[in-house]
Image (tube, rainbow, N blue to C red):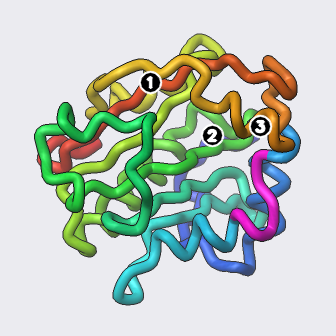
């Protein structure tokens, strides 16, 4: 493990990194979380006018983290979203789909830097805020804690957010194929950057 943040490089997420992203995502979140088709869709939803909102973190050419972000108007507001509580036009909200850091490299600020880069790119695209659903059952609720430290505000909690996904092949690392984990719907208004 390294303690030197300067050796970590951050680059836009492209197809060159898809294989490593899929491996890390399934290792951290559970088998079936990500596959070839999903990573293509997720990444394409984050590119508008040649600006890419998704990034990878590399250490000596090894992928140690990534963030997928959907551009505003490139994602669907569903039953797990509460746009009436966002205090910003929903068409000006990007969606922070996934943030993943290899367990061996946590605590080095990688997640925060990936979020910062995603916010900067989303702002270039015209977004004013970003929505995310954070995994409340993450170890020590670290996902919600990290997002809160970066300016995230809790909007609403959603039990069983990933239950349907778990019945269609996703194997939650805690619940298996019958996930009952809770999602914290959170927002970051971009006037309060990390």
Among numbered discs 3 and 1, the one appearing first in the sequence: 3
Task: Return the mark for residue 75.
Answer: none
Q: Are marks 2 and 3 in contact (CB under 8 Å)?
A: no
Among numbered discs 2 and 1, the one appearing first in the sequence: 2
Kind of element beneath mark 2: loop
State the residue in front, 1 or 171.
171
Report which quarter residue 66 is drawn in: bottom right
The residues colored magenta run 33-38
- Residue that mark 2 sits on: 3
Q: Residue at x 18, y 36 (%)?
A: 84
Q: For label 1, count other residues whose C-alpha is less than 10 Å away and answer few (under 14), some (14-19) or many (20+).
A: many
Q: Quadrant of the N terminus?
A: top right
State the residue in front, 17 or 7.
17
Task: Return the mark for residue 28.
Answer: 3
Kind of element beneath mark 3: helix
The residue positioned farthest toward the top in the image shown: 140
Q: Position of residue 150 (x, y in %)?
A: 33, 35
Q: Is residue 72 visible?
A: yes
Kind of element beneath mark 1: strand
Q: Is residue 148 above or below residue 30?
A: above
Is 27 a magenta residue? Answer: no
Nearest-to-viewer mark from 3 and 1: 1
Q: Residue at x 57, y 48 (%)?
A: 98
- Residue that mark 1 sits on: 184
Q: Residue at x 44, y 34 (%)?
A: 80
Q: Position of residue 47 (x, y in %)?
A: 45, 78
Q: Residue at x 43, y 56 (%)?
A: 76
Q: For label 2, count other residues whose C-alpha is less than 10 Å away and answer few (under 14), some (14-19) or many (20+).
A: few
Q: Is residue 15 above or below residue 184?
A: below
Residues under labels 2 and 1: Cα distance? 30 Å
Nearest-to-viewer mark from 2 and 3: 3
Residues under labels 2 and 3: Cα distance? 21 Å
């Amino acid at each position: 493990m390294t303690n030197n943040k300067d050796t970590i490089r951050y680059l836009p997420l492209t197809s060159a990194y898809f294989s490593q992203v899929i491996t890390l995502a399934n290792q951290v979140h559970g088998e079936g979380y990500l596959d070839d088709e999903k990573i293509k869709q997720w990444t394409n939803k984050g590119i508008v006018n040649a600006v890419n909102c998704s990034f990878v973190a590399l250490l000596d050419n090894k992928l140690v983290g990534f963030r997928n972000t959907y551009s505003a108007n490139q994602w669907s507001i569903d039953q797990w979203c509460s746009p009436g509580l966002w205090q910003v036009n929903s068409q000006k909200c990007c969606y922070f789909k996934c943030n993943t850091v290899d367990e061996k490299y946590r605590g080095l600020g990688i997640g925060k830097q990936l979020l910062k880069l995603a916010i900067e790119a989303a702002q270039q695209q015209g977004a004013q805020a970003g929505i995310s659903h954070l995994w409340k059952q993450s170890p020590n609720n670290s996902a919600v804690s990290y997002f809160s430290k970066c300016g995230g505000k809790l909007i609403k909690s959603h039990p069983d957010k990933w239950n349907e996904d778990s019945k269609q092949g996703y194997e939650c690392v805690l619940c298996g194929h019958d996930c009952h984990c809770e999602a914290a719907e959170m927002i970051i208004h971009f006037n309060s950057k990390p």
